[in-house]
Image (cartoon, rainbow, N blue to C red):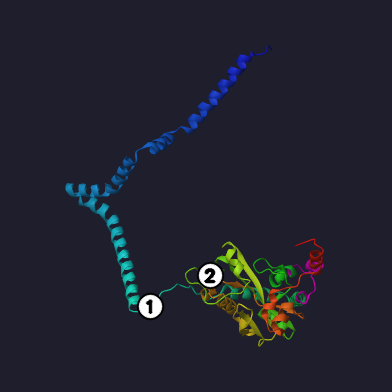
Amino acid sequence: MPLRHHSELRQAELNRQANLRRDRRQRLYTKWYYYRILKKRIHPREVAKRQLEEILEPYHALRKAINEGEWTRFWEIFFPRGYGWLRRQYELYLNVLEFFRTLRDLMLRQAAVVFKVEHRTIYPDKARLYVLDKSLLELSEDDRLIVISTLLQVASGRKITWEEIQEIPALRAFVERFIAYYQKFPCKHSAFVLRLTPVIYNYAHLLRSTYYVLRWVPAENLKADPYLGRSRPVSFGITPITYKPDSEVWNAMMYAGEGIVDLNDLLTLRRDATGEKIMVHPLRRIIYSPHHVTYEFARELGKPELTTVIHHCSPYIRIGRKSRTGKILDYQHDPRITRHFRRKFVKELTYYMGLRA
């Protein structure tokens, strides 16, 4: 077969590209394309004129129906538009009336509207607590004893093994819901502490333990309001949150006290800016009315209106051990010592050797 000339090949390629461009123009340059081009090039005065004609079209139709005596068509056009206009005027009248009533009450010192706070009658923390205990009670007696004894041992300092989880598959689910170290953020913490619920209390009763409360709140709500401010100063650990993005979530665990896991044990739920305890509650109230934890933390922040915004995963217990912070807060006269922690030996050694700052 004879070879094609170079010019013929080039001409075939040009024809192919021309056909592709023609097909593309046929796909793109439809009547809607030209309509958009004309709409962009149309004069603004013409656009305003068309908009005015669309607004006045119903009124012209009404006038035409009156002139021609077609009352049936007149009422068909008037009723939908007239009813909407009357409804809008009535709503405007109610808003203006409410405004002047509030203004009159303020002038007569009979009302003072500062802000609006939404209150819940059923707290979600209470519902979660009920679900956790119900899931424990639905286990068989033997499995429940094994799960709760394992949880108590983990709270005492023993690490859970993979063989135990394989032996009892339900153990992993309860560990992830009751042990703070295995929970998901924002209820996660680096401590092996056990969440105390009404069912867990019956098995941990009279065990020497340390109490903790864990609260979490969005950084947006933790910051001071520029108009209302705060009613009291906050601790040094909350001040840096001012520079965090509003979308972040802040959580912190606080030492609440020590006891033998009894309903009459007193737990500290609110401290001042220096760390001194202000308000204590019995364990009975914290377990069966957990909203007191969020209420006291909102007052600690100087913003009581945040009661329905703050959440918590409390209380927690650590069996048989007491932290350094707990010893300082219970036996030292100055709680500010808790701000200064001793660095680890390796860090101190490398610092004096000049290997780190």
- Circle 1: element type: loop
245 vs 121: above or below: above
75 vs 130: above or below: above
> Percent from the top left, x then y, of residue 111?
38, 78
Q: Which residue is mark 1?
A: 111
> Percent from the top left, x then y, of residue 341?
73, 73
78 vs 243: above or below: above
Q: Do we see residue 316 in this rendering?
A: no
For label 1, the crowd category at 10 Å Cα-Cα, with few meaning under 14, some 14 to 19 and many 20 or more, is few
> Percent from the top left, x then y, of residue 2?
68, 11
Magenta segment, which residues?
153-170
Q: Amino acid at mark 1?
A: Ala
User: Toward the viewer: 222 or 159?
Assistant: 222
Taking the magenta stretch, the answer to whether it contains residue 165 is yes
Residue 309: mark: none
Taking the magenta stretch, the answer to whether it contains residue 279 is no
Indicate the quadrant containing the C terminus: top left, top right, bottom left or bottom right: bottom right
> Percent from the top left, x then y, of residue 290?
60, 78
Q: Residue furthest top?
A: 2
For label 2, the crowd category at 10 Å Cα-Cα, with few meaning under 14, some 14 to 19 and many 20 or more, is some
- Circle 2: element type: loop
User: Which residue is at a point 62% across and 84% down the rendered structure image?
Assistant: 280
* Quadrant of the image occupied by residue 132: bottom right
Q: Which residue is mark 2?
A: 224
User: Toward the viewer: 164 or 44?
Assistant: 44
Label whose residue precedes the other's in the sequence (2 or 1): 1
Q: Residue furthest bottom?
A: 264
Indicate the quadrant containing the N terminus: top left, top right, bottom left or bottom right: top right
Q: Amino acid at mark 2?
A: Ala
275 vs 27: above or below: below
